[in-house]
Structure formats: C-alpha cells, structure tokens
Image: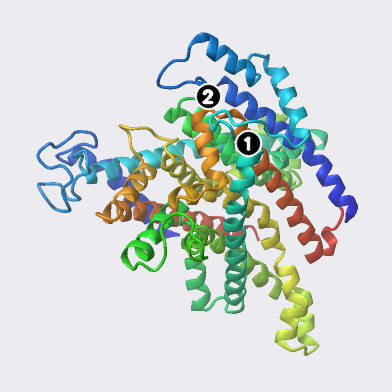
Amino acid sequence: MKPALFLVALIALVALLVPPLLPYDHISIDWDSVRVGLFSDGHLLGTDDLGRDRLARLLVGTRVTLSVALAAALVALVIGVAWGAIAGWVGGRVDEAMMRIVDGLYALPFMFVVILLMVVFGRSILLVFLGIGFVEWLTMARVVRGQVIALKQRPFILAAEAAGSPARATLWRHILPNVAGVAVAYLMLTVPHVVMIESFLSFLGLGVQEPLTSLGILVNEGAEEMDMNPAALLLPGGVLVLLIASLTVAGERFRDRLADAAK
Amino acid sequence: MGRLISRRLLTAIPTLLAIIILSFVLMRVAPGGPFDGERPLAPEVRAALEAAYGLDKSLPEQVWLYLTRLAQGDFGPSMVYRDFTVGGLIAEALPVSLLIGGCALVLASLLGISTGLWAALRAGKWQDEVLMLGATLLTALPTFVTGPLLALIFGLWLGWLPVSGQNDGWNWLVLPVIALALPVTGAVAKLARAGLAGELGSDHIRAARARGIAPLTILRRHALRPALVPVASYLGPAAAALLTGAVVIETVFGLPGLGRYFVQGALNRDYPLVLGVVTLYAGLIILFNLFADLIYGWLDPRMREG
C-alpha cells in the first residue's frame, strides 16, 4: 500500500506544483517552435501541432483528471453513504425498497446514460463529475448498508439506546464513525474507476473540453499522431495507467487490511 | 429453473421500459435536433420532416408510439442515415460487435480463470504475488490506451496485423479482441484466485484431504465449482464492460459495430438510432445477468431459486 500511495502522491504533487514553474502554460502557443520533438527549444517534451508545450499539457491534464475523479468520487461517497446508512438503519420495507432500486440500477448500461447526459447538457466539467458520481454510488451504498446492519447488532449500540441516546445522535456519533473506514476504502477504489470513466468520456470527445485538457484528451490526440511521435501516446497513457494501477492497489490493500482487522 | 427464467424475463420489462423512457426524455430535452445542418431548412420543409417522423406530437404521445412500434419489433427509421431503418443498421452492426465481444469474453474467461487458479495453488509464493500484481495492472489498462498502443506496436512497427477495418480473413480480429479482453482477464484472474484460495482453506476440503483423496481429484471434484462462484457473479458486469469497451475499440480500429453508431447517433441527435442501440444494450445486459444467475445456480445449488 505504501509505495502505491507514495506514487499517487508524487504524481499529484508534481501535477499540482510544477506547472506554475514552467516557462510555458498549457494553452499559449509558441509560434517559433510548432511541433518540435523532445528536449528542443526549451520544451522538455516538445510541442504539439498547435505549438503548445507538451509537458505543461501533460501536467495540467493530470491535474484535471485527478480533480474530476476526486470530486466525482466525493459525490458518490455522499450519495452512497447516505443511501446505505438510511437503508441499513431503518431496515424493513424501506431497506427492501431502497436496495431493490440499487439492484435495478446495477442492471442498467450506465455508461450509455452518462454518454447521453454529456451529449444533452453541453459537456460542462461540473456535469462530468456530477454525472459520474451519480453512477458510481451503488457499490458504496451496498457496502455501507451491510456495515450499518452489522453494527446495529453490536452491544455498544444497544447500550447507547438504553442510555437514552436519540436515534439521530446514535447514527451520527456511533454508527457513521464506524462506517468511515470502509467508506474510505471504497472511496479509494472509486477514484481509479472514475479516472477511467472520465478519460473514456474525454477520449470520445464527450468529457472535458478544450482549452482545458485531460489525460483522456491527450491519449486521443496522441493516438492520432502515434506513427510520427509515439511519445505523444505513451506519456499520457503511461501516466494514466500508473495512476489507475497504483490507486487500485492502494485501495485494495487498505480494504483487505480493514477486513483482516475486523476478523 | 423455468420459473426463474420466466420471472426474470418479466421483471426485465419494467427495467427496459424505464431505460427507454429515460433515454427518450433525455434526448428530447437536449438542445439541437437531427435536422440542424449547416444551412437552415425552410420552415415548411422542416415542419413536413418533423411531421413525417412524428416529432410534432406531444412527448408522451411520441413515447407511446415508439413503444407500440417497438413491441412489434420495429425500431423505426434512422433520422440521419436517410433511407435506412434502425433495425437494418443494427442488424448489420450487431454481428460485428457480438463477434468481437464474444471472442474477448471467451479469451478473458479462459486466460483469467486458468491464471487465477494457478495463482491460488501457489498462494503466498512469489508466483502468486507476481501474477496478482500483473492482474491488477491489467485491470488498470483502459481500452483506449491499449488499443492504439497495440495498433502501434503490432500494426505499424512490426507490420504483423492490420490496424483498421475488416478484411476477408480473421486477423483483423486479433488486436481489437486482445485490447478488449485484457482488463476483463485481470478482473477474472483476481476473482478466480480469491475464490479458489478461500475454498482451499475451507473445512470440506480439509476433510477431503484427511480422507486421503488425491490433490488433483479434490481440486476437480470438490474445490473447482464453488471457487468459480465469484467469477460467475462477475459475468454481468463483465458483459457491460465489454460493451462499453467495444465503443472505444470500434472507434480506434474503425470497425462498423454498434458502439460507433451509438456515439455518432448521440452526436447527430439521431433519436431512433440511439434509442434502438440503448434498448439493445440494456436487453443484452439483462440477458447476461440472467445467464450469470443460471451459472451461479449450477455452481452453487444453495443459490437456486431463492
């Protein structure tokens, strides 16, 4: 878990801190050196066919992809925890109905609904993460519900109730803090998933729009000129794969550790 | 089993209706329409076109009209590809998509299950660690990265395989299928490993060992079936992943499948085409979930008919 998290932190820090230090930003055009190769004219990774600095675009794209993913995962976290906690806490018919809805939604080809949403509502970046967040909360809701049901039967909850703690206080003070670990583990697993969806949409031209850029857009651009300049595909693709892989490894290790601790 | 199938098919109807109505409404509230072109049409022409496609009616009326036609197997005409029906376009594109998706599913299952089982038998050893790290890496490979990359290496640099379009042979299939199968292979391998590793530690396996049954027989007769339960439950999501992955793969490799029609149709506001493809996808995914449940019941009799 540690090396994976370290890698993610490193990528995030570089993407966040380095762009202001570069002599070029991700949109300005260097007319004197359009489409130059690596290490030329002060552009470490060269420039694209519009003369924009590739390094700046790569870093800004990474930043955009990461922030969209984090925001969408937070949307999923809020909806999922609220839905799962209510269903697990209230129980009975309400639980049954709420979980049926989750089962039903699982069966839908959601990617297609998100694609439709993007086409319909003009592809704003806000909508990208709201839309993805609305799709990704289902697993979170299931996991949180299971956890809440397990917690409800524990003696300390009974003790709290016996001591006269109102339901709302029990939920806030005793249940939710104990759900937090699992929720964070699944949040960590949601982020790489969202990274994948965001870049998928951007690759199809339905996600983030120019002049902003994202790893998906850069991969798409890179794929078009890969025969002339393979680095244009390999660099953003490599960063993307590295990000998704290390986020997944970190999330899985964290989840397994929690499961072991629970035993 | 017959009861399970008929019940599941019945509950699929409201799900399908929900997704059709949702997509219908989403498409219609979108700004722009199928007849927006470079040159604005004369108002009379536009009105006539809209009347011909039933766009002048109220939204509920349009939905009802669409559903009654759909019930008779008529997907309606395409609004952008003139003179083509959506049914005709789908009939042309579906075999391509099914061929790619089917091959990828078979490849991913075979490769994933065998790798996962082998890793479970080596649980805790370095082979297990390496294979599982590899499987995680595979799941992290988006099709839109591997697709172009494979095309670059095996198509452009080595020149072994064609990079775009179909041909009379079979070799056009290789790269799209591999790119599509890779992430699913990783996921299947992880699930198969977790399934068998958990099973090998269970009491009935220990009992079988204590009775002196040969390890291979234990694996084949006692451990394998329950170990594959997690893999079976992944079949539904895998089908969904393959269908969405196919959208990218068909774009990257220039193949005339359903995914391209879907994206093009959504961008062109070709309402009937998008609706038709979405309906078909939803139906396929529902069928796959049913199929997964049947396999599930076969693997684990306790799961039958709950």
Residue at the image position 76 percent from the left and 46 percent from the top: A153
In primary-sequence order, the first of circles 1 and 2 is 2
Q: Position of residue B82 (x, y in %)?
A: 55, 30
Above or below, comparing residue B223 to residue A39 in the picture: below
Neighbour tally class for label 2: few under 14, some 14-19, many 20 plus, Cα within 10 Å:
some
Regarding residue A161, the answer to whether it shows in the image is no
A14, A172: nearer the viewer: A14
A174, B96: nearer the viewer: B96
Q: Which quadrant of the structure image shows residue B149? A: bottom left
- The number of callouts visible is 2
Q: Amino acid at mark 1?
A: Val
Q: Residue furthest right?
A: B3
Q: Is residue B130 left or right of residue A34?
A: right
Judging by the rendered image, the residue that carries numbered circle 2 is B34
Colour scheme of this structure image?
rainbow
Regarding residue B132, the answer to whether it shows in the image is yes
Judging by the rendered image, the residue that carries numbered circle 1 is B86
Residue at the image position 36 percent from the left and 42 percent from the top: A217
Neighbour tally class for label 1: few under 14, some 14-19, many 20 plus, Cα within 10 Å:
many
Q: Residue furthest top?
A: B43
Q: Is residue B299 left or right of residue A253?
A: right
How far apart marks 1 and 2 lie (CA) works out to 14 Å
Q: Which quadrant of the structure image shows residue B207? A: bottom right
Instruction: Output the chain of dot 1.
Output: B
Residue at the image position 36 percent from the left and 53 percent from the top: A237
Q: Residue furthest front?
A: B83
Q: Position of residue A89 (x, y in %)?
A: 73, 37
Residue at the image position 39 percent from the left and 55 percent from the top: B148
Q: Is residue B222 left or right of residue A192?
A: right
Q: Amino acid at mark 2?
A: Pro
A162, B101: nearer the viewer: B101
